[in-house]
Image: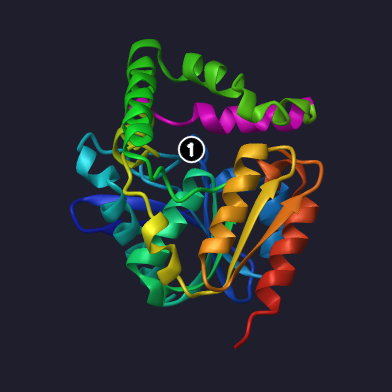
Amino acid sequence: MTRVELPGNFALNVEVSGDGPPLVLLHGFTGSARSWGRFGELLAARFRTVAIDIVGHGESDAPADLERYEMPIVVDDLVAAVRQLGIERAAWLGYSMGGRTALHVAAAHPGAVAALVLIGASAGLDCTEERLARRSADNALADRIERDGVPAFVDYWEALPLFATVRALPAEQKAAIRAGRLRNRAVGLVNSLRGMGTGAQEPLQHRLHELGMPALALAGELDAKFTQIGRDLAEAMPDARFAPVPGAGHAAQTEQPETVAALVTDFLTHLPH
C-alpha cells in the first residue's frame, strides 16, 4: 500500500505490482485496488500494474467536500498520483466507473495515456433528459446509502440485474467481492455518485474523435447494453476496436479473468512503439 499525498490535505491509495510497461488500473463503483483478483495477478505477470483506489473508495481518502469527486478534479488527481510514482505515460485500463474515468483522463491528459482499455464502460449520457434522469436516480441512491448504510446498499447493489452473472461465481469469490465493497465508507460512495456519477459527468461523445491513442473496448457478450456501447465507442474513436468476452456479463474481468487478461495482454504487447 502506497499513500500518495496530493495538494489540499488529500491522499490516494495506490497498489503497485509486477514489472514491465506501466498499466494503470481504475476499478468500478464500490470496488478498490484490491478488487482486481485473479485478473490483476495475470496482468502483473506482464506489466507494472498501478491499481488506484479512486477517491472515496478503498483506502483512499473520502473527503466530505464534493468538489474532490467532480470528474475534472478526479482525473487531475489520478494523473498527478501516477506522475509522483515516476510514470509520465502509461496504458490506462478502466472497468465501468473506472472506464468512464479513464476516458476523461485521455480527454484531459492525452499525453499521459499511451493506450486505453475500457471494460463495460461508457462515454456518459449524451441526451440531456437521460442525463438529468440518471442524476436524479444517482442522487436517490446516494440518499439511500445515507439513510440505510453501506451493508444494506451492498445488498441492493449486488441484486441488480446488471450483476446477474456475477451471482453465478463460486461462493468464496463472491464473499471476497462483498467484503471489499463493505470496506467502503458511506460518505465516499455518496459523494462518488453525486460528483462523478454517469448523470453528473460531462458526456464525452463529442470528443471521442479527438482520442487518437490505441484503444480496446471490451464487454461481456451477455451484457447486451454495454456490448452495444462498446461497439459505439470503438466506432467513434480513430484507433479503436471492440471485442466481446464470451460467457461473461458486465464484470467480464471478474467472470472470465484469463480470457480478458489474454485480450488485454495481446493488445498492449502489439502496440506500435
- Horizontally, residue 154 falls left or right of residue 83, namely right
Compared to residue 135, the image places residue 202 above or below, namely below
Q: Which residue is mark 1?
A: 29
How far from the left and from the top, in percent, is residue 46?
Answer: 70, 70
**143 or 223, nearer to the observer:** 223
Report the amino acid beneath label 1.
Answer: Phe
- What are the residue bounds of the magenta stretch? 171-188
**Residue 93's image quarter?**
bottom right
Residue at position x 34%, y 57% in the image: 75
* Marker count (numbered): 1
| Coloring scheme used | rainbow
Tell whether position 185 is magenta: yes
Residue at position x 60%, y 43% in the image: 226
Residue at position x 45%, y 76% in the image: 89
Tell whether position 139 is magenta: no
How far from the left and from the top, in percent, is residue 87?
Answer: 44, 75
Residue at the farthest top position: 148
- Horizontally, residue 206 falls left or right of residue 20, namely left
Q: Main secondary structure of the magenta part?
A: helix
Q: Is residue 117 visible?
A: no
Q: Quadrant of the C terminus?
A: bottom right
Residue at the farthest bottom position: 273
- Horizontally, residue 173 falls left or right of residue 3, namely right
How far from the left and from the top, in percent, is residue 35?
Answer: 60, 43
Residue at position x 37%, y 52% in the image: 12
